[in-house]
Amino acid sequence: MEREQPIFTTKAHVFQIDPETKKNWIPASKSAVSVSYYYDTTRNTYRIISVDGSKAIVNSTITPGMTFTKTSQKFGQWSDPRANTVYGLGFSSEQDLQKFIEKFKEVKEMTRQVVNQTPPIPPSTNQNSTSQVNGNEESHSSSSKHANSSQPRQFLHHRSSSLSAMQGSDTSSKQDANLRERRNSFNSSPNNSSNNASESQLKYENDRLKLALAQSSTNAKKWEVELQTLKNNNSRLTAALQESTTNVEEWKKQLAAYKEESAKMKKKIVELEKRQSGSEQVAALQTELQQLTERLERVQLDNQDKQDEINQLSLRMSELSARETQSSTLQSRCKKLEDENDHLKLKVEDLQRQLTERNMSHDQENSELLRLEDQLGNKVTELYEIHEQIISLIRKESHS
């Protein structure tokens, strides 16, 4: 059993207030989309949700302090403090707007009862029926109107009457209207309610899977960016470590060469001292030996510094190995998310296919009903003509 269930669904154009000017409306949908009330049986909360493609354009949790305001004949709006925005809905008819307002009042009353720790009465799930107001709503109607009139109306913006173009005008004659009424009287099918309920359930499943797919894709992209950053840092540190190792090898070779040269110079000094010849040459050699000794000490100090640097780089390499372990874990999670995304995509496609098949079967039933209505209308017309002929014959016989 699903945690959230749709209790009311309608079609409308969705708008959001401009966050900068707080005056202009920004269209959130290119065309009329489904706008539904959902009831969370676990949390006892109600939400208004609308999905355009794979993007959730409306996700508003209803609170007792919210108010839905009708600003024109086919346009209404409400403010969501949690989302810090104002939503607007443009309907194709005033009747649809009135049904949405009634359902909003009913759901808000249910939310108020939940807040007051009274057992809520679940609202009706029939989309075409109007909301019935119980005794509690009548008792609180005067207080709620007074509270709504005192709230600030800084977000009220009147929509131009251009939305009235969404609904086409009917300019038929009286006879066509009567004939249409006769045909519409036969347009009652017991399967419509079950078809609407199954279509609503399929649409809810489709919207929920699209939301989960969008969330999974966002998390996968974030982890891929973090993994790429770790890989770049690892490659840079590896290159620096290799360069330092190469420099240390070169310095070790230079140190060995200096040690060899120092040993040779010491041998020459010993030989010169044995021969006791050339005190000046001995002094020069001693000076050169002193310089070589100082250079050797400097090289040893540099070697010690480089050794410390190598130790630091080794520590960083150990840290990188730990991060690589984390990156491998992230890769496995990314793979798992990709598999889950593929599974969700397949499920979405299956649900869309089921919805398409259901719509096709519904269209076929409608076309069959229209054909039967045409046949019935023709039969009624023929009966009417036969009736007129019989009346005319009776009149003729009565006159004769």
Image (cartoon, rainbow, N blue to C red):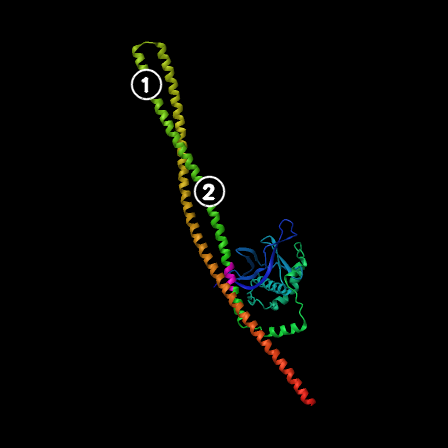
Residue 380 image offset from top left, x and y in percent: 60, 78
Above or below — where is 183 with respect to 140?
Answer: below
Residue 292 image offset from top left, x and y in percent: 38, 19
Confirm whether the magenta stretch covers residue 77: no
Q: Which residue is mark 1?
A: 264
Dot 2, crowdedness within 10 Å: few (<14), some or many (≥20)?
few
Residue at left 40%, top 44%?
325
- Mark on residue 229? 2
**Amino acid marked by disc 2:** Thr
Q: Secondary structure at mark 2?
A: helix
Dot 1, crowdedness within 10 Å: few (<14), some or many (≥20)?
few
350 left or right of 281 in image? right
**Amino acid marked by disc 1:** Lys
Quarter of the image holding residue 398? bottom right
Quarter of the image holding residue 282? top left
Residue at left 58%, top 76%?
376
Q: Which residues are magenta?
A: 201-207
